[in-house]
């Protein structure tokens, strides 16, 4: 499972209130949520992300409110994968559950700049910055999470299980 | 995160719930106060199911142990825009406020509202400041009615709402305009949390929030003049 995209970069402690502010939580259409992703931090984010990007974060990415719309909004906006120094645990689980790959990748905030072309091999955890030619090792995802992501997240996964019975 | 010591054995369930609510902001999975008679009485009043309290093992290992002398702590405020940007309320008297929000899952229980009422009794909210008070549940709402707390709040000039999350997350009511400042008893103060990304939120306990509403700037409630 290889993922490619240009890097869009943010700092430490990106919280779910800035990823998708409370005023948008009444939206239920993922596409509509995606239009407002991270607009408070970078009004141009959705424009940058629409063709598919790798989101680079610092420490404690996704802290704050447990709203799952944060992960949904990023995914709908065009984020193919989030790489961060560390994640807030609730966001991390939400991301996987909505089918957005999230990998802890120590050193990434120093080794990637905005606009760099990044490739991620989810199976091995190998992260390559093709612009600079550097390679980093992220924590790889276990098999059951990889298959959950392949299916598109927790809901399609459970639908599949129920269907099989 | 586990909390022990005389501060916590003496603390009410309402107070323990406030502390355990906030640990998630520090990245904890759960906040734990070892179960005692108070916690058992609380749980038994809510369920008839048999239950067995679980305590940490005597030989449990902890990543870190921090000790504080709570008697030496003065009211603390988490300054905009992060929950760990903490200063003592006394240092923040130059922070003028436009709005006070008292409520939420963090500080909207009956003890919190009694505390706010004890500060607001016989006082009036500062000119130009709006104060929104939201009980955290229907149960708390009814108890406030019985105790007459709503009269106290309304005589002080506050708005009492239905039980709701409301302003805490900028959901509805009390949305902050650009440049506005709110002191809130809720749990998060990130950029744009309660409205405009150009507004600011300070987090405090109900007494500090209520007292700040009276003087129009952040204040240690112990420094409030007699009404």
Image (cartoon, coloured by chain):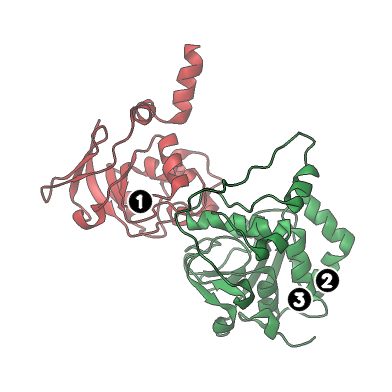
Chain colours: A red, B green
For the image, the number of numbered tags is 3
Foreground: B48 or A44?
B48
Q: Are marks 3 and 1 on the same chain?
A: no
Of the 4 image quadrants, the one containing the C terminus of chain B is bottom right
N-terminal-most mark, 3 or 2: 3
Residue at x 59% of width, y 71% of height = B182
Q: Secondary structure at mark 2?
A: helix
Q: Position of residue B119 (x, y in %)?
A: 76, 76
Which numbered mark, 3 or 1, is in the foreground of this view?
A: 1
Residue at x 79% of width, y 73% of height = B118
Q: Vertically, is A130 above or below A144?
A: below
Q: Read off the residue under disc 3.
A: B119
Foreground: B225 or B55?
B55
Circles 3 and 2: CB atoms closer than 8 Å: no
Q: Position of residue A126 (x, y in %)?
A: 20, 39
Q: Is residue B209 visible?
A: yes
- Mark 2 residue crowding within 10 angstroms, few (<14) / some (14–19) / many (20+): many
Chain letter for mark 1? A
Circles 3 and 1: CB atoms closer than 8 Å: no
Chain letter for mark 2? B
Q: Secondary structure at mark 1?
A: loop
Q: Secondary structure at mark 3?
A: helix
Q: Read off the residue under disc 1.
A: A86
Foreground: B69 or B200?
B69
Q: Are marks 3 and 2 on the same chain?
A: yes
The residues tagged by marks 1 and 2 sit, at their Cα atoms, a distance apart of: 47 Å
- Mark 3 residue crowding within 10 angstroms, few (<14) / some (14–19) / many (20+): many
The residues tagged by marks 3 and 2 sit, at their Cα atoms, a distance apart of: 10 Å
Q: Is residue B1 left or right of residue B223?
A: left
Q: Read off the residue under disc 2.
A: B152
Q: Is residue B171 visible?
A: no
Of the 4 image quadrants, the one containing the N terminus of chain B is bottom right
């Amino acid at each position: 499972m290889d993922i490619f995209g240009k890097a869009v970069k943010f700092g430490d402690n990106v919280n779910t209130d800035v990823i998708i502010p409370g005023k948008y939580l009444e939206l239920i259409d993922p596409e509509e949520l995606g239009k407002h992703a991270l607009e408070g931090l970078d009004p141009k984010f959705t424009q940058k992300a629409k063709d598919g990007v790798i989101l680079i974060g610092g420490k404690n990415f996704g802290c704050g409110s447990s709203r799952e719309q944060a992960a949904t909004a990023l995914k709908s906006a065009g984020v193919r994968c989030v790489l961060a120094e560390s994640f807030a645990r609730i966001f991390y689980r939400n991301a996987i559950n909505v089918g957005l790959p999230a990998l802890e990748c120590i050193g990434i905030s120093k080794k990637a700049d905005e606009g760099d072309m990044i490739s991620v091999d989810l199976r091995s955890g190998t992260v390559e910055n093709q612009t600079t030619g550097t390679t980093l090792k992220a924590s790889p995802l276990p098999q059951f999470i990889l298959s959950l992501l392949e299916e598109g997240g927790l809901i399609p996964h459970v639908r599949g299980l129920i269907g099989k019975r | 995160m586990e909390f022990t010591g005389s501060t916590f054995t003496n603390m009410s369930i309402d107070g323990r719930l406030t502390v355990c609510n906030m640990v998630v902001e520090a990245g904890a999975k759960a906040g734990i106060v070892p179960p005692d008679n108070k916690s058992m009485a609380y749980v038994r009043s809510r369920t008839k199911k048999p239950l067995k309290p679980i305590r940490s093992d005597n030989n449990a290992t902890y990543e870190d142990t921090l000790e504080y002398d709570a008697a030496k702590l003065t009211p603390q405020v988490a300054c905009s825009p992060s929950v760990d940007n903490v200063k003592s309320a006394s240092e923040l008297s130059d922070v003028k406020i436009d709005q006070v929000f008292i409520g939420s899952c963090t500080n909207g229980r009956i003890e919190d509202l009694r505390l706010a009422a004890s500060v607001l009794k016989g006082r009036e909210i500062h000119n130009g400041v709006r104060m929104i008070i939201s009980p955290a549940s229907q149960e708390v709402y009814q108890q406030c009615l019985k105790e007459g707390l709503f009269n106290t709040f309304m005589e002080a000039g506050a708005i009492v709402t239905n039980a709701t999350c409301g302003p805490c997350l900028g959901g509805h009511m009390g949305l902050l305009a650009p440049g506005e400042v709110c002191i809130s008893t809720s749990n998060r103060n990130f950029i744009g949390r309660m409205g405009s990304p150009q507004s600011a939120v300070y987090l405090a306990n109900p007494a500090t929030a209520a007292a700040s509403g009276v003087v129009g700037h952040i204040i240690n409630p112990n420094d409030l003049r007699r009404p």
